[in-house]
Amino acid sequence: MARVIRACVDVLPVDGASISVMTGTQEREMLFASDDVAAQIEALQFSLGEGPCFEAFTTRRPVLVPDLPQASASAWPVFATAIEELPVGAIFAFPLQTGAITIGAIDLYRTRPGWLSGDELTAALEVVDLATVVLLGLQLGDVAGDGWWGALSSNREQVHQATGMLIAAMGVSAEEGLARLRGYAFVMGRSVDEVAHDVVTRQLSPFELDR
């Protein structure tokens, strides 16, 4: 998978790329990022529950944003505010799908605004198809390893635990519990994983997230 993502950066006029598997805004795990900025883009989207990656996954269509500062303010207002400090001028998100199944998304970013040409877009779609085949092979056990779905569940374990603690303490739904984690993380300028860790280790009371 690392080779697939590096190939994106090598053959396309982009500065970084990442790949995530997901089932929606609540179940998502980044498998690989080419650099720290790509990793931060992914972390922000999961923490906030919005962004081009989620839109590509939900609509099952590429989301091409050649000028992120102008487009994101209306499409993803919270994400737009959070990403302002990162050197990102454009994002191109592609769903990983086969038939009726969508299993994740790939994000490509550029530091400067600008479109991908027709040939470059074709190359990106070919890489996306390759990544989909690799991920399906992992899930079906065709490639050595335990599969990415088990990794997704285990790597987000603290987020699930923290959400459960909010449900128990406050009587809210799972969706509301995750929303409160995300809201608190955004206000405090932290990632949802960091906040979940503090709740699980009892450094942070579930009721403090309601303030």
Image (cartoon, rainbow, N blue to C red):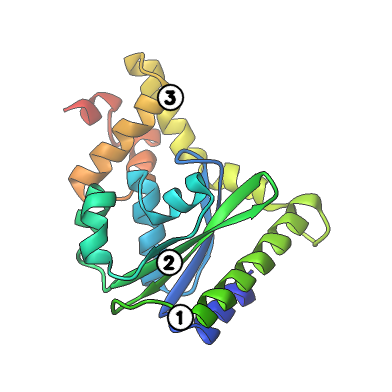
Name the kind of residue labelled 3 in the image.
Answer: Ala
User: What is the number of callouts on the image?
Assistant: 3
Name the kind of residue labelled 2 in the image.
Answer: Phe
Residue under circle 1? 117
Classed neighbour count for the residue bearing mark 3: other residues with Cα under 10 Å, few (<14), some (14–19), many (≥20): some
| Residue shown at the point (36%, 63%) measured from the top left | 40
| Residue shown at the point (64%, 72%) measured from the top left | 126
Q: Going by the picture, which residue comes out furthest to the right?
A: 142
| Label 2 vs 1, first from the N-terminus | 2
| Label 3 vs 2, first from the N-terminus | 2
From the viewer's side, name the closer residue of 67 and 17: 67
Residue under circle 2? 92
Compared to residue 123, the image places residue 211 above or below, namely above
In the image, taking residue 14 as reference, residue 149 lies left or right, namely right
| Label 1 vs 3, first from the N-terminus | 1
Q: Going by the picture, which residue comes out furthest to the left?
A: 211
Classed neighbour count for the residue bearing mark 2: other residues with Cα under 10 Å, few (<14), some (14–19), many (≥20): many
Name the kind of residue labelled 1 in the image.
Answer: Ser
In the image, taking residue 161 as reference, residue 203 lies left or right, namely left
> Element type at marker 2?
strand
Residue 169 visible in the shown view: yes
Whole-angstrom CA distance, mark 1 to mark 3, is 42 Å
Residue under circle 3? 174
Residue 163: % across, % down: 41, 29
